[in-house]
């Protein structure tokens, strides 16, 4: 067993992830939500940036015990609400939640 493990070499794979600014005339809103224990104590947050990557607005909030998916939805809702209130109408939403992206795009049903 030791000889087998001694010769083992893991195969690492990675994907480069890079934030790109929006095109001229657009805003980018990045969102994230998190829940400890799922459901459990939760937070949601967003930030909005312009074409130069400058931070235009951001907000983080504590929400009642929720699931991870609910926190992601709250983060998107709060980001869109901020953009609407500040007349930032050409908005690109970016979320790290595959489930939420698939639900919004109609690929998955709402649970």
Image (tube, rainbow, N blue to C red):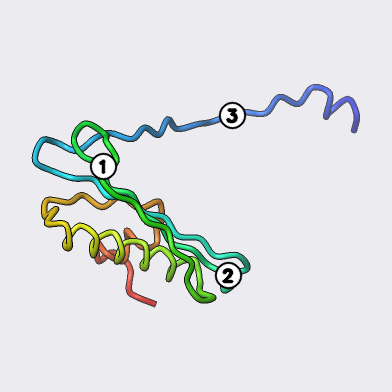
Q: Which residue is mark 1?
A: 49
Q: Secondary structure at mark 1?
A: strand
| Earlier residue among tags 2 and 1 | 2
Percent position of residue 1, x then y: 90, 33
Relative side of 76 to 97, left or right: left
Secondary structure under tag 3 reads: loop
Number of numbered callouts drawn: 3
**Image position, residue 46 (x, y; %):** 35, 54
Report x, y in % for residue 51.
18, 35
Q: Earlier in the sequence, mark 1 or mark 3?
A: 3
Question: Disc 2 marks which residue?
Answer: 41
Residue drawn 16% across the image and 62% down it: 84
* Image-quadrant location for residue 85: bottom left
Tell me whether the residue at label 2 lies in contact with that at label 3, contact meaning CB atoms closer than 8 angstroms. Answer: no
* Alpha carbons under labels 2 and 1: distance apart: 28 Å
Considering every residue shown, the one lying at the far top of the view is 7
Q: Earlier in the sequence, mark 2 or mark 3?
A: 3
Residue at (52%, 67%) from the top-left corner? 42
Q: Which of the image's four quarters has the C terminus?
A: bottom left
For the residues carrying marks 2 and 3, which lies nearer the camera in this image? 2
Quarter-wise, where is residue 79 in the image? bottom left
Q: Position of residue 91 (x, y in %)?
A: 17, 51
- Label 3: which residue? 12
| 29 in relation to 107, above or below | above
Foreground of the two, 56 or 8: 56
Q: Residue furthest left?
A: 25
Please state if 1 lies on the left or on the right of 31 as rendered: right
Tell me whether the residue at label 1 lies in contact with that at label 3, contact meaning CB atoms closer than 8 angstroms: no
Q: Label 2 to label 3, Cα distance in Å?
A: 34 Å
Displayed quadrant of residue 31: bottom left
Rate crowding at label 3 as few (under 14), some (14 to 19) or many (20 or more) other CA atoms within 10 Å. Answer: few
């Amino acid at each position: 067993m030791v000889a087998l493990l001694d010769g083992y070499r893991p195969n690492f794979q990675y994907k480069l992830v890079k934030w790109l600014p929006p095109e001229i005339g657009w805003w980018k809103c990045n969102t994230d939500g998190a829940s400890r224990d799922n459901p459990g104590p939760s937070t949601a947050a967003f930030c909005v940036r312009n074409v130069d990557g400058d931070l235009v607005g951001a907000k983080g909030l504590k929400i009642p015990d929720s699931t991870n998916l609910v926190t992601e939805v709250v983060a998107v809702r709060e980001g869109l609400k901020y953009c609407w209130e500040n007349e930032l109408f050409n908005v690109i939403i970016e979320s790290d939640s595959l489930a939420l992206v698939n639900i919004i795009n109609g690929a998955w049903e709402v649970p």
